[in-house]
């Protein structure tokens, strides 16, 4: 069964979700994530607007969240920040083009269309709307995560997809 993974956006210790293409304030991260956990979610994907530009404002929030749910954080490839996130058992999402210094199963490579590498060093991969890459990474032994909006994956691929990123607020509000 495919793991459903809601995407939340975080900035200045506040959580947002996309609704109709716009970001909508949802509240404090711990309150929002506890509600998601009660609905049965096991993993939450954060796009950290602060960390994408090198600001580590939300580290204490992630530390608190990892005590009760699995999270993955999309951030800039800042070695110090990555090390801190990994130390609290947080999954770290980085562009697949960024080659980590060592392999770590908590590192998640975000693969963009046209990527021709093998995502060395990453435990899992997120395929950014390119169905042709799904089989490639499954054969390489990676767990594959895709975006909900990517409807053109073959039925045989969809059985092997490990996770599905839910990008719209409405997708997890009604779960």
Image (cartoon, grey):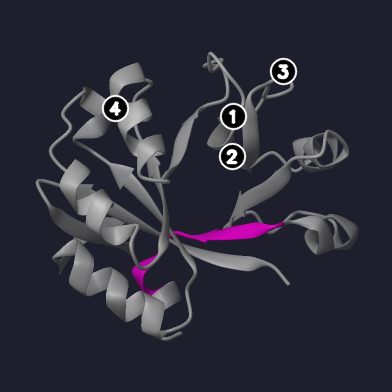
Return the residue at label 2. Answer: 128
The label nearer to you, 4 versus 1, is 4
- Which residue does the image show at 38% across and 43% down from the upper left? 73
Residue 165 on the magenta segment: yes
Which span of residues is magenta-colored? 162-170
- 10 Å neighbourhood of mark 2: few (<14), some, or many (≥20)? some
Cα distance in 3D space between marks 3 and 2: 14 Å
The spot of residue 65 in percent (x, y) is 29, 60
- 10 Å neighbourhood of mark 3: few (<14), some, or many (≥20)? few
The label nearer to you, 3 versus 2, is 3
Q: Give the mark nearest the N terminus, 3 or 4.
A: 4
* Dot label at residue 81: 4
For the residue labelled by badge 3, is the local secondary structure a helix, a strand or a loop? Answer: loop
* Dot label at residue 112: 1
* Dot label at residue 117: 3
Q: How many marks?
A: 4
């Amino acid at each position: 069964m495919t793991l459903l993974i809601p995407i939340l956006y975080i900035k200045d210790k506040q959580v947002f979700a996309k609704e109709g293409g716009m970001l909508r304030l949802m509240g404090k991260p711990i309150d929002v994530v506890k509600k998601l956990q009660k609905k049965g979610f096991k993993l939450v994907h954060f796009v950290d607007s602060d960390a994408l530009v090198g600001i580590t404002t939300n580290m204490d929030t992630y530390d608190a969240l990892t005590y009760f749910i699995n999270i993955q954080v999309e951030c800039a490839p800042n070695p110090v920040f990555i090390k801190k996130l990994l130390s609290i058992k947080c999954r770290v999402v980085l562009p697949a083009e960024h080659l980590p210094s060592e392999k770590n199963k908590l590192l998640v490579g975000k693969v963009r269309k046209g990527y021709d590498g093998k995502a060395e060093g990453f435990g899992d991969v997120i395929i950014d709307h390119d169905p042709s890459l799904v089989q490639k990474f499954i054969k390489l032994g990676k767990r594959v995560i895709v975006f909900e909006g990517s409807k053109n994956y073959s039925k045989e691929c969809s059985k092997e997809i490990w996770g599905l990123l839910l990008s719209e607020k409405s997708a997890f509000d009604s779960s």
